Amino acid sequence: MRKKASAGFFYIINKWTALAFCVLFILGVLLATWEVGNIVKIVAQPEKKPIYSVDTEGMTVALGINCAWDNSDIPELLSILEHYNVKASFFVLGSWCDQYPESVRQIAGAGHEIGSHSNSHANLTRLDKEGVLSEIRESCRKIEELTGKAPALFRPPSGAYNSEVIGLIEEEGLYPIQWDCDLIHMKTLKEKLP
């Protein structure tokens, strides 16, 4: 067995051990640099969020209505909105456009805004980039075919979003819209009233 000669704190080692050590050291530095770069990149980017509300001069309410299931209440909703001279934003699914094209046309014909609510009500945070883009593009295509107007608004299904989803919505030229008060909030408020 060969003895290693000592030179203070250092040992003289064979060239293969030295080469292996150098390679591991360089890989460690590269990995650490990559990780730090990604952490800095993630921390430096502000979180993207949808629009919850906007400042206005007077007291104003923006009414958003999601159309994802059936169309049985559309005639009554349109009648009530017309009676009170109220315009709303209807967020429709692409699949809802397929099932109820006449309702989409009625809503648009009554002067209401039609935004997209995705094509199939998928949780966009669980899809890859291409899946999210497909949901956005397909629904917008269907809306434009029925109304003659491309939507400007997009509301993520179930309110589920992350920075990547919001970024993709914006890259498609749409405004991501969220709500800040819904029927669940109204129920809670009603229970607190005397």
Image (cartoon, helix red, strand yellow):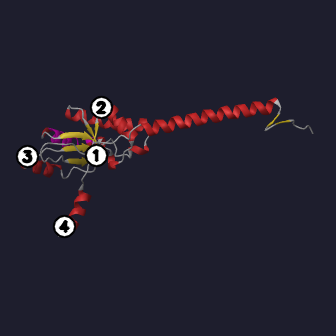
Name the N-terminal-most of marks 4 and 3: 3
- Foreground: disc 4 or disc 2: 4
Dot label at residue 178: 1
Left or right: residue 81 versus residue 29 is left
Badge 3 amino acid: Asn
Name the N-terminal-most of marks 2 and 3: 3
Residue at 34% across, 44% down:
120
Badge 4 amino acid: Leu
Among the 4 quarters of the image, the one containing residue 111 = top left
Mark 1 and mark 2 in contact? Answer it, CB < 8 Å.
no
Query: Could you tell me which secondary element the residue under label 1 belongs to?
Result: loop
* Magenta part, dominant SS: helix
Name the N-terminal-most of marks 4 and 2: 2
Taking depth in this image into account, of 39 and 137 the one nearest to the observer is 39
Residue at 33% across, 47% down:
157
Mark 4 and mark 2 in contact? Answer it, CB < 8 Å.
no
Asked if residue 158 shows in the view, the reply is: yes
Name the N-terminal-most of marks 1 and 2: 2
Any magenta on residue 104?
A: yes
Among the 4 quarters of the image, the one containing residue 110 = top left
Q: Which residues are magenta?
A: 97-108
Left or right: residue 12 versus residue 180 is right
Asked if residue 128 shows in the view, the reply is: no
- Foreground: disc 4 or disc 1: 4
Disc 4 to disc 1, C-alpha distance: 26 Å
Name the N-terminal-most of marks 1 and 3: 3
How packed is label 2: few (under 14 Cα within 10 Å), some, or many (20 or more)? few
Dot label at residue 85: 3
Quadrant of the rendering where the N terminus is positioned:
top right
Quadrant of the rendering where the C terminus is positioned:
bottom left
